[in-house]
Image (spheres, helix red, strand yellow):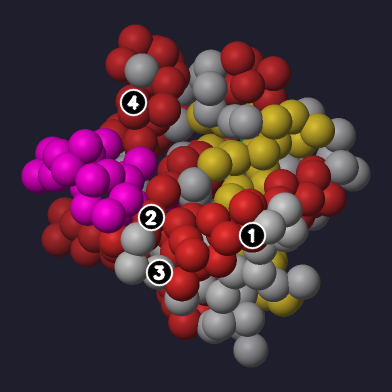
């Protein structure tokens, strides 16, 4: 079905693998288009409760946008390229189901930006993060200047983007860019285990938490107001009644996402 990515549904988790290992999984137009289709499936398929994104091969998550496409682009085409990336990465960030990056090697440029658009990140101990665009005469174009600053703060974000240096996994953990560091072998099992923990929770509540946290970063929204609205809306759900009743009856809740 896909040329440059592969997807597999594994116990309700759609596992999306960027699959161009000979080019360190660089994101060309086809990857971006296919990623958009896979993200659509996360939104629409009721059999999918969460997704993980990873890279194929032992070396790279994604080593960036495909640099070979750059030299011939005009300013207008550059704008279009950036807008397409922004739209898809925003859709990942806004998804009502958790989407997590399992970073298994180089996460550079657009790869770091894709990881940052995910709800959170796990990394194997061989992961490397960076925004090396200044080395090429460009800047991050898929949200990196904004999301990196939000995640690690202005000073550290500027240092990374101005030097083009890479962070190793332990530094990324210390700087708050990733939540967990594992061995390469443990990366996918640990990511699946974390996602399966979320599987038992009330799906509408999961979606509302994501929405409220995202609201913190929207300049046209007041996150506290969003929280009041979403908290209130929870009282109209069958899941809240089920969760509260199950607690009182000392049993495991059976949430239906209603
Ligand atoms: N776009 C296109 N092709 C890329 C790529 C990218 N972002 N990153 C790596 N590749 C390709 C290389 O051109 C090479 O292809 P080839 O075998 O046909 O020559 C292949 O992937 C392997 O990469 P190579 O550079 O030989 O691996 P390495 O281990 O020596 O170095 C990196 C790894 C990640 C340090 C290096 O590939 C690199 O700096 N990549 C670009 C990173 C970048 O600037 N990303 C931001 C882009 S906006």
Sequence order check, earlier mark of 1 and 2: 2
Front residue of 173/203: it is 203
What is the C-alpha distance between the residues marked 4 and 1?
Answer: 41 Å
Residue at image mark 2: 208
> Which stretch is magenta?
210-232
What is the C-alpha distance between the residues marked 1 and 3?
Answer: 14 Å
Mark drawn on residue 74:
none
Sequence order check, earlier mark of 4 and 3: 4
What is the C-alpha distance between the residues marked 2 and 4?
Answer: 24 Å
Front residue of 108/49: it is 49
Residue 5 visible in rendering: no
Q: Nearer the viewer, mark 1 or mark 3?
A: 1
In the rendering, at what x and y percent does residue 77 appear?
22, 63
Quarter of the view holding residue 192: bottom right
Residue at image mark 4: 149
Residue beneath the point at 59% across and 31% down: 178
Instruction: Report helix, strand or loop for mark 4.
Output: helix
Check if mark 4's residue and mark 1's residue have beta carbons within 8 Å: no
Sequence order check, earlier mark of 1 and 3: 3
Instruction: Report helix, strand or loop for mark 2.
Output: helix
Instruction: Report helix, strand or loop for mark 1.
Output: helix
What is the C-alpha distance between the residues marked 3 and 2?
Answer: 12 Å
User: Tag 1: Cα neighbours inside 10 Å, few (<14), some, or many (≥20)?
Assistant: some
Residue at image mark 3: 237
Residue beneath the point at 41% across and 28% down: 151
């Amino acid at each position: 079905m896909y040329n440059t990515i592969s997807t597999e549904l594994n116990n309700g988790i759609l596992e999306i693998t960027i699959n161009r290992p000979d080019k360190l999984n660089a994101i060309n137009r086809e990857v971006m288009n296919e990623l958009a289709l896979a993200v659509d499936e996360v939104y629409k398929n009721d059999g999918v409760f969460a997704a993980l994104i990873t890279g194929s091969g032992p070396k790279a998550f994604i080593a960036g946008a495909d640099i070979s496409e750059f030299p011939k682009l005009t300013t207008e085409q550059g704008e279009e390229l950036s807008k397409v990336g922004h739209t898809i990465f925003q859709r990942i960030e806004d998804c009502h189901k958790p989407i997590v990056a399992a970073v298994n090697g180089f996460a550079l440029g657009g790869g770091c930006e894709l990881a940052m658009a995910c709800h959170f990140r796990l990394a194997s101990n061989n992961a490397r993060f960076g925004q090396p665009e200044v080395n090429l005469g460009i800047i991050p174009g898929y949200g990196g200047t904004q999301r990196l600053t939000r995640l690690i703060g202005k000073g550290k974000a500027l240092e990374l983007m101005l030097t083009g240096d890479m962070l190793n996994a332990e530094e990324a953990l210390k700087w708050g860019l990733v939540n967990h560091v594992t061995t390469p072998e443990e990366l996918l099992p640990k990511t699946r285990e974390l996602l399966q923990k979320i599987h038992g929770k009330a799906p509408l509540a999961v979606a509302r938490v994501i929405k409220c946290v995202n609201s913190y970063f929207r300049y046209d929204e007041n996150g506290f107001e969003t929280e009041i609205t979403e908290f209130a809306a929870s009282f109209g759900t069958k899941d809240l009644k089920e969760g509260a009743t199950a607690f009182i009856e000392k049993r495991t809740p059976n949430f239906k996402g209603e």
